[in-house]
Image (cartoon, grey):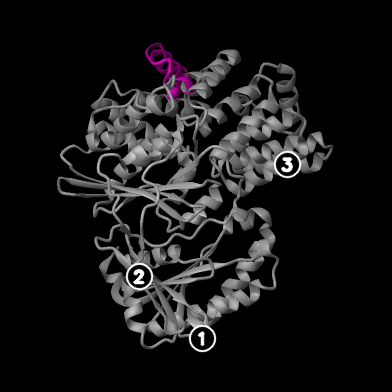
Amino acid sequence: MDQDTFKRKLTTIFNADAVGYSKLMGDDEAATVKTITAYQKIMTDLIIQHRGRVIDSPGDNLLAEFGSVVDAVQCAVAIQKELQVRNNQLLENRKMLFRIGINLGDVIQEGDRIYGDGVNIAARLEGLAEPGGICISKTIYDHIKKKVNLGYEFLGEQPVKNISEPLGVYKLLTKPEDAGKLIGEKSTINFKRPWFAFGGLALIVLIAGAVSLWNDFNLPDIEAANLEKMAFELPEKPSIAVLPFTNLSDDPEYDLVSDALTNDIISILSYQNDLFVIDRHSSFFYKDKPVKIATVAEELGVQHVLEGSIQISGNRIRVTAQLIDAINGEHLWTERYDKSFTDIFKVVDDITFNIISEAQSEIVGESPGDPREGGTENLEAWLLYQKATKYGRNQTEEENHKALELFEQALEKDPGFVNARVGKGWKIWHAGLKGYTEKPEEALKKAEEIAQQLIKDHPNNVGVNALMAAVHMTNREFPEALALAEKNVEIDSNSAKTNADLAWILLSNMQPDKSIDHFEKAMRLDPYYPPWYLNVMIRSYVLAGRYNEAKLAIQEQLRRSPGTFFNGQAHLNLAVVYSKLGEPEKAKDELAKAIEIWPKNTISFVRREVDCTDQTFVADYFQTLQLLGLPD
């Protein structure tokens, strides 16, 4: 950022965000867009009336600033009152509530935009507010407590990422009868359950078993999740989502450590068959987002949420974790580690692997797989691996190449790092499958060599088996692929990916209905699932002759993945569906869109992804595309 183009200033930052926006869009996209547009205009008009300035309003969020703290608070109160009136005119499931956070802080202004800690704190405050409510920082409270006739409730000291000191937070009480009230400066909760009677969650308690803090903590009350707002029915067995641990250190590089800690906890818990564990893909949907525990539980359909943080300073690391019963709005326990940080990898390994693994056999019995198997003790290799996995998730050509480079660098540090070898194999396989290389056949052959070398020594490594199964699929060795996929589900039945992989392979073995069943299980474990799940599930619907369900899934794919490879595949599949439903003109239009979005769409390219034991289906699928005009 050029210093000549920006200036620093002190300003009042206002941040508003719609609650449950994704669910509203999923239920009725047109109605939601109409409502959000109307509500953002109401907010904008009131902000201008209160001498404020709207900075940005992307999607379901609105950011504004005010020269006066009093103006900002009075505007927020006016907005919530007006939106309440508007919401009272809507059906319950169409109401759109907003949370608002207000902070006074130093910001950097460049053009019309503002940046900095002051903005981040306002976003954190918004996430702590109740739906339809307002939260303010202690700085705002100190300025308005004798100037604005409202009530205030202290919510405690809250951590904010990259801010060394915790933030004092107050909730505005806007009812007339609350004017002048001040509800306690601190809220203290006594822990009600130091241990769990049932096995699954007893394992969770052991995550932070070294240093116990069973004394009272100054923690804010937790809003209980609303069972009626659950996006999914609660599982019968204990259910948990592990939120990404927050890096409270000054160095953003330590995000790799906090993310790895989160990944390790999820991985080990997912091996326990008596638990329902949300997949890391959906957990990381909430990374760096100020979100309430109740919202997470409602959107993911779980009872328990684990959250935590790490803070690294010099040669010391502090890791804090707390388990929350979101349904009852209770802190169940909090644990903290304060350790020497001479070896980052050893600290993370101790916390996530050793304690839980030692308890594993006592709690739920041995697993045929070991979630630790395939790792490394080389810190540099481990950090490179973490970077590589981040780059590789979107599967774009550029990120695929970058991930491959990082996996290779990790292997230079530790040639025996099995998970890095698996990662390298996957990136080479993706390059061959998606045409990210001039010699795709050579890439696929290289991936096969890597998989064959690995599976001899690591037959119970889920990653190795998954890679070998993918190679079998490209070689049209469908029964062999199915055997490995079924083995992986036996090892790790709680994993969204193992179920999705099995679903993909079941399709190729001409079992589309079973394939759909496993995709549904994978999507329940990972509500924010990656786009390839739908891409293959759509073909399962087509093979099963369930064309109307295929159309619904295609519409969801188009909504989720605009302008991507998967969007192009969705249009391609919609072309086949329209052809089967006797609508050739619509089919040709969809084929044209598929080629425009993904020019590599040809018969030979798509054939790499569509194959199965029954060549009659394959021949019919491609004959349909050829008749519609897909080039060879």
Within 10 Å of disc 2 (Cα), the crowding (few <14, some 14-19, many 20+) is some
173 to 474, vertically: above or below? below
Image x and y of residue 491, in percent: 48, 22
Tell which circle, 2 or 1, labels the residue nearer the N-terminal end: 1
Judged by depth in the image, the label closer to the viewer, 3 or 2, is: 3
Assign a secondary structure to mark 2: strand
Task: Tell me which corner region of the image, top left, top right, bottom left or bottom right, holds residue 165.
Answer: bottom left
Tell which circle, 3 or 1, labels the residue nearer the N-terminal end: 1
Q: Amino acid at mark 1?
A: Gln
Q: Which residue is mark 2?
A: 110
Q: Which residue is mark 1?
A: 49
Instruction: Tell which residue pokes out farthest to the top in this image.
Output: 456
Residue 401 or 219: which is nearer the viewer?
219
Q: Which residue is mark 3?
A: 551
Screen quadrant of the C terminus: top right
Assign a secondary structure to mark 1: helix
